[in-house]
Image: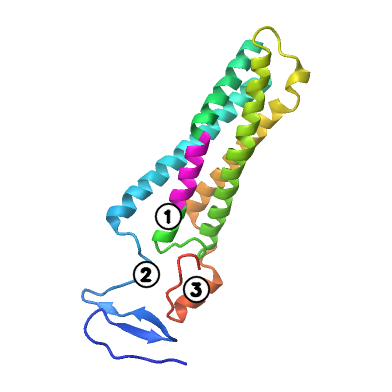
Amino acid sequence: MRSSSGVNGAGSNRVVGAVATPEPVPGGRRRSADRRLPPRARKPLVVLHVVASVSWLALMLCLLTLAVTALTTGDADRLRTAYRAMGMLGDALVLPLSLLTFLSGVALGLGTSWGLFRYYWVSTKFWLTLAAMAASVFALTARLHDAVRVVDAHPSGPIPAAALGFIRYNTVIVPAVALSLYLVNVILSVYKPWGRRRAAAAGARQGRIPGAGA
């Protein structure tokens, strides 16, 4: 059932299906619940998200480089240096950068017309970022701590291969996976494939204003 109300001046609402939709205001602009963040707040948030994202990507690349060095070197001192550097970088940067990237991305989705689940590429980015954050915070930091404990237990001389076990491979695999996930996110951000989800598109055609998480 549709009901309508009269237009009482510029900026009044038309009610369609008991849901208010914005009427045009002077200058041809429309009020919209899609644009929650004003430019003054949105632009700094975009800058924060880009800086955090690039820093996280660079961190994964640095960790992967150090892990490959540790995997391929026959020098025990170089191996110790690589794992200790990885441990310091992981403790200082993995958690803050991953959380900042994820949370700033969520805030941008909720505060702009893109939403979190209105477009296939945005929702895919959301889940991939969440997976990369989980892999970084839980799997990667644990593997880095394991590697540091092993090299600290052998402060000089050669380190037996049995003591390292699968650590040398885990420290390569986890940052490689996180790096790959985030590279996919970069591609999605640039190409924006697949268009809008059907439910969101249908809601827009019916004149509804979908919620931020629709």
**For the image shown, how many numbered marks are present on the structure?**
3
Real-space CA distance between mark 3 and mark 1, rounded to the nearest whole angstrom = 22 Å
Relative vertical location of residue 91 with respect to residue 7 in this rendering, above or below: above
Relative vertical location of residue 170 with respect to residue 178 in this rendering, above or below: above
Element type where label 2 sits in the image: loop
Residue at 58%, 16% in the rendered image: 81
76 to the left or right of 8: right
Where does the image place residue 115, in percent across and percent down from the top left? 46, 62
The magenta stretch is 94-105
- Label 2 or label 3, whichever lies nearer to me, is 2
Residue at 32%, 82% in the rendered image: 13
Q: Which of marks 2 and 3 is nearer the N terminus?
A: 2
User: Label 1 amino acid?
Assistant: Ala
Relative vertical location of residue 6 with respect to residue 53 in this rendering, above or below: below
Q: Can residue 206 be seen in this view?
A: yes
Element type where label 1 sits in the image: helix
Q: Residue 201 carries which label?
A: 3
User: Label 2 amino acid?
Assistant: Ala
Q: Nearer the viewer, residue 199 or 84?
A: 84
Q: Nearer the viewer, residue 145 or 178?
A: 145
Q: What residue is shown with label 1?
A: 107
Q: Can residue 73 be seen in this view?
A: no
Q: Residue 43 carries which label?
A: none
Where does the image place residue 3, in percent across and percent down from the top left? 40, 92
149 to the left or right of 40: right
- Label 3 or label 1, whichever lies nearer to me, is 1
Q: What residue is shown with label 2?
A: 33
